[in-house]
Image (tube, helix red, strand yellow):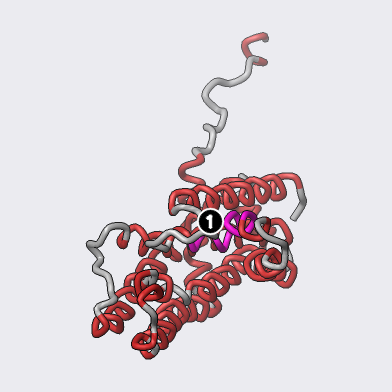
Amino acid sequence: MSQALAPARGTARPPVKLRRVFAAAARSEWIKLRTVRSTIWALVLTIAFTIGLGALFTAIEVSRWDTRTPTEVSGFDPLLYSFAGLNLAQLSIGVLGVLVMTSEYSTRTIKLTLGATPQRPVLLAAKVATFSAVVAAIGLASCFAAFWVCQALLAPKHAGLSISDPGVLRAVIGGAVHLVLVGAIAVALGALIRRTAGAVAVLFAVLLVIPGLVTLLPAPWNNDITRYLPNSAGAAMSAVGRFPNLLSPAGGLIVLCAYTAAALVLAALALTRRDA
């Protein structure tokens, strides 16, 4: 009788491997990302802003080159104007990153997504990883294209740079990394706020409004605070020269990574503790 009541062995379901869950969630996120029009438009705008505005600002500087003083010429940073379009490109990437999360809340498909992947931190990681891979590809392509176009414009004035010059390759890649980290922060904001308008408003405030308000503070507080803001940290990553209101490239990377990690941790906690 005791043998009949003994539990059967070998019938327990094996634990689901998180690696398989992540891979399945990443494939699902890739399908979602590439089948919506907002992705195409946001990425096209990113490329247009990065290359087009960089070329525009560089062409303006070339037209004024003959009126520059020797001091201005010696302090000229070609990449500062080549990557001027990143300020707007990060906004288009940020809006798309917000939509990666909030679009599912607005259509209520988040319940289906969470039902398919109940491991919510894994789901967030899959969303961020998939989106970051796309942004990295677009960011690298557009940053390298902006670099080559702008240096070609500067070549007649002998003011351009070569990709083999010290710090140039690092700066070009740094521009793409800047976009990737801003995109990850945007995804986290979408998970935290859940509403597109609110998350975009917070993102724009962090990237545009707060830096403008900080400049109104008395010196040296304005410069001391500005260099630690996300936008300034990203700018430091794509600069060759050192500017007094910017951190070093490594310092900018550390600061922006810290912002990204903090946002993702808060987003993971919010996803875990709140209902869909």
> For the point 55% across and 61% down, which residue is it?
232
Q: Nearer the viewer, residue 6 or 261?
A: 261
- Which image quarter: residue 143? bottom left
Q: Is residue 176 left or right of residue 188?
A: left
The image position of residue 190, as x and y in percent, is 66, 62
Is 229 magenta? The answer is: yes
Residue 35 in view (yes/no): yes
Q: Which residues are magenta?
A: 224-235
> For the point 52% across and 24% down, which residue is it?
10
Q: Amino acid at mark 1?
A: Val
Q: Quadrant of the N terminus?
A: top right
Q: Nearer the viewer, residue 208 or 108?
A: 208
Is 226 magenta? The answer is: yes
Helix, strand or loop under label 1? helix
Magenta stretch, main secondary structure, is helix
> For the point 46% across and 80% down, which residue is it?
44
Q: Nearer the viewer, residue 67 or 126?
A: 67
